[in-house]
Image (cartoon, grey):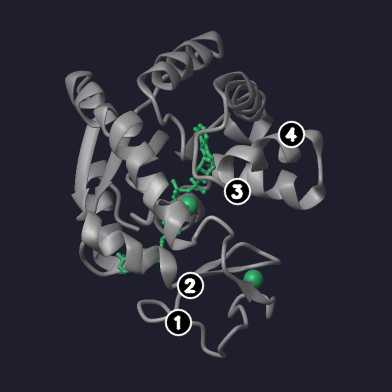
Amino acid sequence: MNIVLMGPPGAGKGTQADVMARNLFVPHISTGDIFRANIKAGTELGQLANQYISKGDLVPDEVTLAMIKDRLAEDDCAKGFILDGLPRTIGQADALEAILAEQGKQLDKVVNIDVPEELLIARLCGRRVCRNCSQTYHLENNPPTEPGRCDECGGELYQRADDSEETIKNRLEVYRAQSEPLIAYYEQKGLLLSVNGNQTINNVLVDIGKGLGQSW
Ligand code: AP5
Ligand code: MG
Ligand code: ZN
């Protein structure tokens, strides 16, 4: 299955995509995670992307689209993928369709995780991520067993640099202006599955499964 996961910053895209990918035996491709891995490794791509990510702005299309084109062409995507974080604009959606068509593929479903904006800031401020394996926690909603340590690998938990209140505000504005129109775009294409993201992590997963005809 070729799936896109959409939703505002903090909606739970990464949280859900991780579990879905493991269950469907397909890769979880997060553009944000790829950028952050490049920032950590100090690559040229990482240095460029960081100028935008640190402010909460979108990384330019020529960089993002070239990166995703290469990633989708890798062998592990042959049986499907969960794409988290792209497209973020109508232009990227059109470009994605063209990239997939070149590879003889198309999207099967676009899952939109719907969460009221007032919940997002608390979700992002309380998020902690494992430095080693990227597993995501929340100080209140989904805490690790031992504070500051990852349950999966024992790695150190850290707060993402773009999870400061000021950057979050800009990310939400960018989402509203540039990404929200994708909901109507994919609805019109008959691909949209909207789920209520304002429920427990597990219940969101169950609802996504129902919409995809999948019991996890
Ligand atoms: P990216 O990393 O994709 O950030 P984002 O879209 O802002 O989304 P987040 O990762 O912050 O949230 P999420 O929905 O994954 O939530 P999570 O599951 O972690 O992108 C970062 C930046 O990269 C962008 O700002 C941009 O600069 C650049 N970029 C990326 N893609 C790009 C593109 N296509 N074009 C251009 N630039 C691009 O959950 C959040 C928290 O809530 C966690 O603590 C979690 O434990 C908790 N939580 C999750 N679900 C629930 C629930 N149901 N109930 C309670 N708590 C929950
Ligand atoms: Mg994420
Ligand atoms: Zn870990």
* Residue drawn at (73%, 47%) of the image: 39
Give the alpha-carbon distance from disc 4 to disc 2, as whole Å. 27 Å
- Amino acid under disc 3: Asp
* Residue drawn at (49%, 60%) of the image: 163
Tell me which numbered mark, 1 or 4, is placed earlier along the sequence: 4
Give the alpha-carbon distance from disc 1 to disc 2, as whole Å. 6 Å
Contact check, label 4 and label 3, Cβ < 8 Å = no
Q: How many residues crowd around disc 1 within 10 Å: few (fewer than 14), some, or many (20 or more)? A: some
Q: Give the side of residue 22 with respect to residue 73, left or right.
A: left
Tell me which numbered mark, 4 or 3, is placed earlier along the sequence: 3
- The residue indicated by pointer 1 is 143
Toward the front, the furthest residue is 166
Contact check, label 3 and label 2, Cβ < 8 Å = no
- The residue indicated by pointer 3 is 33
- Amino acid under disc 4: Leu
Residue 183: image location, x then y, percent? 23, 31
- The residue indicated by pointer 2 is 137
Give the alpha-carbon distance from disc 3 to disc 2, as whole Å. 15 Å
Contact check, label 1 and label 2, Cβ < 8 Å = yes
Assign the N terminus to one quadrant of the image: top left
Tell me which numbered mark, 3 or 1, is placed earlier along the sequence: 3
User: In the rendered picture of this protein, how many numbered marks are placed on residues?
Assistant: 4
Residue 142: image location, x then y, percent? 40, 77
Give the alpha-carbon distance from disc 1 to disc 4, as whole Å. 32 Å
- The residue indicated by pointer 4 is 45
Tell me which numbered mark, 4 or 2, is placed earlier along the sequence: 4
Tell me which numbered mark, 3 or 2, is placed earlier along the sequence: 3
